[in-house]
């Protein structure tokens, strides 16, 4: 199963036989006080730096979230997307929990976007899926519903099944459905990452769907997060994870992904691995 | 200080729940008062855990297991403390708002509140406005705490406060809000009485607000 995302001039393909798709997570004001204040003052300049850093770090796509409280999020997100598209040709993941913001973003986006995200709640799917269809986008879906985030893989799979059926019913091709197998902090429960890995394995086995995950969440609240993030990626990739919204500015983490690509046969003969080594040597 | 209390302090900080439970029972058998166990061992241990967390010397799992160790001891002590009629520092009703399932931050705040001697009633996640109103009516807490992790669920603060107003309960309770995207400014806009950026600050702020209220 191949999911093709694009900008006006560039395509990225997600698939179990494709190199891993790194979606840079940095364009997100949550927990970034200065960035928030600037955005509230209508100053989008931080975006230029964050785009440049993530492109240089090796991102394949960029997530754009403009969730700043007490602002006009739809307008802000639309402007941010236009700005990012003027700075890079990487495809974008439009990230908001506000439906109006998702639509505002989709309206101005050039290419085929990934919409981040919807849950398995009926009322969310009823509103978001028609948008996804209308704008011919792909959708990232989280297997949780109105009551809770299920911890066990088997419980998550029940909601995945519900989402798959609903997407099919809407007449959207399953290529355009990307499941988020839910990364929870291992510091909050020692079983959290095992449950995530099991979910990844089951989604691949049962549906062959592409998957993307908020990878940095696994190391929340722990020291030396880069090392944990870098260790998590190859494990998840070996289970069948095809993409992540993740830290694309830390070489240690990006390299672990590219190494796993090679080790898993997704970078045949090490073409990408060797050429990025040469590029680094030349600098 | 007795050896039991010293060891209890150390084992609570280390998050050794089974040992803390043993020591609590042993301490009571040896004639220690529930008050002494709480105020001379458990609360100081959690205060130190909170201070270290704030400094970046302690991490989330360490705080969670220290909290768990204390909770185990509190289960034994609570009925005894009720018998002695000891006044709690304050009663706190806590919940994550409707539409939101995030609970790690809320749980950390609960731990620090219990560690500071508060009685905490946790309503869990996805708490509807009706449930908040009911809980305030039933438990008559000093403080109602609401947590939200998403910019889309934060507006529930305002909805909940409005519902409390309608039920005539707003003025009787202090309202605190928190969560990753929440700011002091936002707390002011929705009409909350207090905001804190992290668990330790939340405890300090809660104590200040109660002092002001009880001073009236």
Image: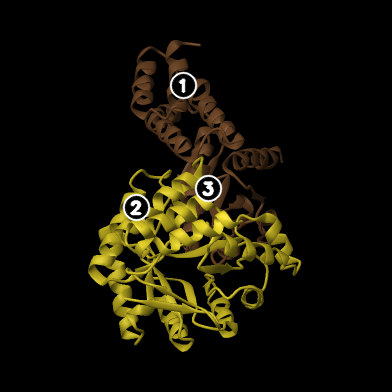
- Mark 1 nearby-residue class (10 Å; few <14, some 14–19, many ≥20): some
Q: Which residue is drawn at 45% across and 32% down?
A: B66
Q: Residue at x 48, y 26 (%)?
A: B42
Q: Distance between the residues labelled 3 and 1?
A: 35 Å
Q: Which chain carries label 3?
A: B
**In the rendered structure, which disc, 3 or 1, sits on the residue that comes first in sequence?**
1
Q: Which chain carries label 2?
A: A
Q: Kindly indicate whether the residues beneath marks 2 and 3 are on one polypeptide chain.
A: no
Name the quarter where the C terminus of chain B is drawn: top right
Residue A235 marker: 2
Which is more toward the observer, B41 or A145? A145
Q: Which residue is drawn at 61% across and 68% down?
A: A66
Measured from the top left, where is residue A56 in percent x and y?
59, 62
Type of colouring: by chain
Q: Can residue A169 be seen in this view?
A: yes
Residue B83 picture quarter: top left
| Tag 3 residue | B140
Q: The brown chain is which one?
A: B
Mark 2: secondary structure:
helix
Q: How far apart are marks 2 and 1 (CA)?
A: 36 Å
Query: Residue B171 vs residue B70: left or right?
Result: right
């Amino acid at each position: 199963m191949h999911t093709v995302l694009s900008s006006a001039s560039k395509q990225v393909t997600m698939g179990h036989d494709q190199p891993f798709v790194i979606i840079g997570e940095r364009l997100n004001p949550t927990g970034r006080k200065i960035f928030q204040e600037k955005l509230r003052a209508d100053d989008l300049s931080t975006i230029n730096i964050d785009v440049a850093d993530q492109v240089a770090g090796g991102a394949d796509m960029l997530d754009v979230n403009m969730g700043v409280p007490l602002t006009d999020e739809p307008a802000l997100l639309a402007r941010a997307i236009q700005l990012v598209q003027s700075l890079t040709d990487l495809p974008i993941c439009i990230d908001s929990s506000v439906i109006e913001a998702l639509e505002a973003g989709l309206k101005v986006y050039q290419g085929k976007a990934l919409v981040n995200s919807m849950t398995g709640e009926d009322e969310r799917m009823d509103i978001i899926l028609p948008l996804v269809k209308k704008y011919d986008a792909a959708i990232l879906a989280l297997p949780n519903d109105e009551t809770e985030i299920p911890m066990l893989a088997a419980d998550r799979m029940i909601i995945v099944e519900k989402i798959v059926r609903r997407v099919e019913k809407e007449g959207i091709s399953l290529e355009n459905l990307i499941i988020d197998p839910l990364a929870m902090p291992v510091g909050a429960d020692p079983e959290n990452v095992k449950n995530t890995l099991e979910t990844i394995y089951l989604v691949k086995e049962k549906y062959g769907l592409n998957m993307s995950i908020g990878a940095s969440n696994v190391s929340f609240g722990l020291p030396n997060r880069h090392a944990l993030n870098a260790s998590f990626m190859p494990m998840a990739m070996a289970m069948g994870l095809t993409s992540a919204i993740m830290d694309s500015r830390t070489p240690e983490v990006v390299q672990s992904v590219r190494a796993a690509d090679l080790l898993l046969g997704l970078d045949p003969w090490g073409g990408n691995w060797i050429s990025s080594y040469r590029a680094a040597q030349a600098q | 200080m007795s050896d039991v209390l010293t060891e209890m302090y150390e084992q609570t900080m280390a998050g050794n729940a089974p040992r803390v439970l043993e020591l609590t029972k042993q301490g009571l058998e040896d004639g220690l008062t529930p008050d002494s166990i709480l105020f001379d061992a458990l609360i100081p241990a959690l205060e130190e855990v909170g201070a270290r967390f704030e400094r970046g010397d302690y991490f989330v799992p360490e705080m969670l297991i220290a909290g768990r160790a204390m909770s185990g001891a509190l289960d034994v002590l609570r009925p005894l403390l009720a018998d002695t009629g000891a006044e709690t520092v304050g009663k706190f009703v806590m919940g994550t708002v409707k539409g939101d399932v995030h609970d790690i931050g809320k749980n950390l705040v609960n731990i620090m509140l219990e560690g500071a001697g508060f009685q905490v009633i946790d309503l869990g996640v996805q708490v509807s406005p009706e449930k908040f109103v009911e809980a305030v009516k039933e438990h008559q807490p000093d403080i109602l705490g609401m947590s939200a992790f998403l910019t889309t669920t934060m507006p529930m603060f305002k909805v909940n406060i409005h519902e409390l107003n309608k039920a005539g309960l707003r003025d009787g309770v202090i309202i605190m809000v928190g969560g990753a995207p929440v700011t002091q400014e936002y707390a002011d806009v929705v009409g909350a009485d207090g905001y804190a950026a992290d668990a330790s600050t939340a405890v300090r702020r809660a104590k200040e607000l109660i002092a002001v209220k009880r001073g009236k």
